[in-house]
Amino acid sequence: MIRLVLMFLTLATTLHAESIVLGLSQDSVSITATFDGSDILIFGAISRDAPIPPDAGQLGVIIAVSGPDQRVSVYRKERRVGIWVNTDEVEVDRAPSFYAVATSGPLDDVLRDTEDLRNTITVSRAIRSVGATVPDSATFTDALIRIRAKEGLFQMQEGAVDLEQDTLFRTSFRLPANLLEGDYLARIFLTRDGRLVDTHSTVIPVQKVGLERWLYNLAHVQPFLYGLLSLVIAVAAGWAASAGAAALKR
Amino acid sequence: MQLYLPIAEVSVNIFLILGLGGLVGVLSGMFGVGGGFLITPLLFFVGIPPAVAVATSTNQIVASSFSALLAHLKRRTVDLRMGTVLLIGGLVGSSLGLVIFNYLRELGQVDLLVSLFYVVFLGIIGALMLVESVNAILKSRKAGGARKQRKHHYWVHNLPLKIKFRVSGLYISVIPPLLVGVLVGILSAIMGVGGGFIMVPAMIYLLGMPTKVVIGTSLFQIIFVTAYTTMLHATTNYTVDIMLALLLIVGGVIGAQVGTRIGLKLNAESLRILLALLVLLVCGKLGLDLLLQPSELFSIKAAGAL
């Protein structure tokens, strides 16, 4: 099977000999104190060794950006003794903290299901949940996708990739403010009639910097010191307040 | 203006948080309450994760209580011995509370636990305050009504391990103050409050302490218990957000000065009714969230990066 795929892939590349050349508006994203989300522009061109044969299928570009994977618990509420309580839980072993897909056309036209399955391109393929203890575990992964989509963490933008003269493409993604740190992977898929022709990927590091970085590290590496620091600040502020109030009275 | 909070990992509007701190500061200045019981639910409402809200508001309470304690120390209205006994109980209670908190966090029930605690305690306190202040107003209209004689023989006087508390003028067993301390410690860890709203009535009605030393002594206990709780949250859950605390503290300090001035101009009893209504309002909002069917039945909790 794999050999067949490989053969097919080499065949496809030799036939069209199309490959991706990529550019990014920024190589990394810094989370500073005033960070309020960020837009990232992904653009590029398709380089060809030979002119496009007239029988070549429709060209498609799919861009997927994924954040670090997490283990996620999904809870469902039910009414118990009159109040709404978390009752069922499904552990999703692996779900991206951020996942955005943009395509140059309707998804069904630019990507075949088999290619999606092989390359885990759409978000439902990127979530892995095994050993669920409830019968309807699919509703839990659906809920995960729905909630993350509402927070802007999962995005599906069909037709958001501008494809000009079958050569130049570009799209932009909105990274929301509640972003997890880590290496974000941007993957670009080039398809003809929904079949993969070429892929290209690049890493965009997302990191807290400056004060944010320092405080976060202190809190996690030296929690005792961090706790003391927060208390010192609190006591100093309390003292300053009473001193200030006394000065105001005079 | 947005500010990204490094621990809560959300971006918040600076002025919204300063305003929240200020609002609670105004209230604490007006009514003489710590305000922890208001700040934590308000932080939930603006989208701070509950664990961070609880841990950070304990840090904020340290600041607001410290300036008040300084004033009480100057006036010598702190019973240090009683405060120490309450404190020992408080440290035990806070440790216990954190164990419960973390256990339920594992189970995914911590939001429910915190909400339930708030609904129950805010409901009780709000109702009691409302009834009492309405009664007081009615009584003051029928001026000259017979004042009820306060009982001076409490059952607590018959327990063993008696100690002399000179400042309070009491000779009682250490068991009741220890238990009061434990209860307040548990509340501090779970609800992110100082617990003055439970401790003050308990000290007056249960222990029979004179009213003038009650506030100072409770502040003494609250500072150390909330400081200890802050340390516990910081070292076990990493959920204390310094930036958030700082904004709340700055807002609170300014608000408290404003509140004190407003409080001097208003009638004390109508003030109490206002506070009672406010407490019941917050309680009602939290209660409705539990009772009404939520629009989203599912919730997610990430266990951190793999």
Image (spheres, coloured by chain):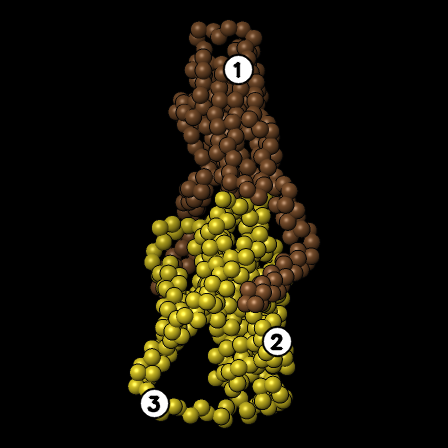
Q: Do labels 1 and 2 share a chain?
A: no
Q: Which of A20 and A165 is in front in this view?
A: A165
Q: Which residue matches tag 3?
A: B144
Question: Of tags 1 and 2, which is closer to the observer?
Answer: 2
Residue ID for mark 2: B73
**Would you say B220 lies left or right of B273 here?**
right
State how far apart marks 3 and 1 are (Cα).
93 Å
Mark 3: which secondary structure?
loop
- Please tell me whether mark 3 or mark 1 is closer to you in this view: 3
Amino acid type indicated by mark 3: Gly
- The amino acid type, in three-letter code, at marker 1 is Ile
Q: Residue B42, relative to residue B167: is it above or below?
A: above
Q: In this view, does B227 lie to the left or right of B121?
A: right
Circle 2 residues within 10 Å: few <14, some 14–19, many ≥20: some
Note whether residue A133 is visible.
no
Amino acid at the residue labelled 2 = Leu
Protein chain holding label 3? B
In the rendered image, what is the letter of the chain coloured yellow?
B
Q: Marks 1 and 2, Cα distance to the nearest angstrom?
A: 76 Å
Please, which chain is the residue tagged with disc 1 on? A
**Disc 1 on helix, strand or loop?**
strand
| Other-residue count near label 3 (Cα within 10 Å), few / some / many at <14 / 14–19 / ≥20 | few
Instruction: Say above or below: A32 vs B34.
Output: above
Q: Where is residue B20 in the image (x, y as percent from the top left)?
A: 46, 57
The residue at the point 55 percent across, 29 percent down is A186
Q: Name the residue under label 1.
A: A46
> How far apart are labels 2 and 3 at the CA level?
36 Å
